[in-house]
Amino acid sequence: MPATHDIARAESLDAHTERVFSGGTSDNIDLWDVASGELLRTLTAHAIAVYSVAFSPDGRTLASGSGDKTIKLWGMASGELLRTLTGHINSVVSVAFSPDGRTLASGSSDFTIKIWDVSNVNEATK
């Protein structure tokens, strides 16, 4: 992959498409093609650094956690922001989907773990 001006802090590989998302010290999340190294898309909605990204098991949704204390859920087909989850009082440093993709866990530097029902995320509005 070509050099960027961002330091990657979070990466997630989508095994369905062989693409990887990376987040870092900027508020952007970049989608890369693994085979070619080509930058395919940039998602922007966080206010500051992205610390964690995770694909849902079906590859349809990406979750991102940030220093802005939010979790963003993204539709992979369109790159559209589907939902913003709030509730942590400090940076969200980890996100992970359950094996069935219906639940998301988030961990924060506020020393809390939150469990979110994301079973209808593709039907949700922003």
Image: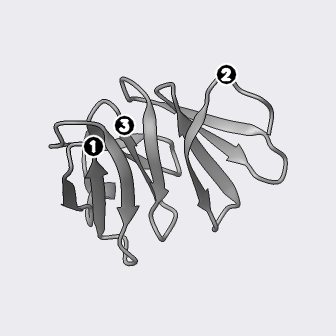
Residue at (44%, 41%) from the top-left corner? 51
Q: Amino acid at mark 2?
A: His
Q: Based on the displayed image, in which of its 4 quarters is residue 48 positioned?
A: top left
Tag 2 secondary structure: loop
Q: Amino acid at mark 1?
A: Ser
Tell me how many marks there are. 3
User: Residue under circle 2?
Assistant: 5
Tag 1 secondary structure: loop
Which numbered tag is attached to residue 66? Answer: 3
Q: Nearer the viewer, residue 47 or 42?
A: 47
Q: Nearer the viewer, residue 126 or 95?
A: 95
Tag 3 secondary structure: strand
Q: On the rendered image, what quadrant is the C terminus found in?
A: top left
Mark 1 or mark 3, which is nearer the start of the sequence?
Answer: 3
CA gap between label 3 and label 1 equals: 11 Å
Residue 3, position in %: x, y? Answer: 77, 29
Q: Tell me if 67 is positioned left or right of 88 in this view.
A: right
Q: What sort of colour scheme is used for the picture? A: one colour
Mark 2 or mark 1, which is nearer the start of the sequence?
Answer: 2
Residue at (64%, 67%) from the top-left corner? 15
Which numbered tag is attached to residue 42? Answer: none
Mark 3 or mark 2, which is nearer the start of the sequence?
Answer: 2
Compared with 78, 121 (above or below) is below
User: Residue under circle 1?
Assistant: 109
CA gap between label 1 and label 2 equals: 25 Å
Residue 47, position in %: x, y? Answer: 36, 23
Q: Tell me if 19 is positioned left or right of 126 in this view.
A: right
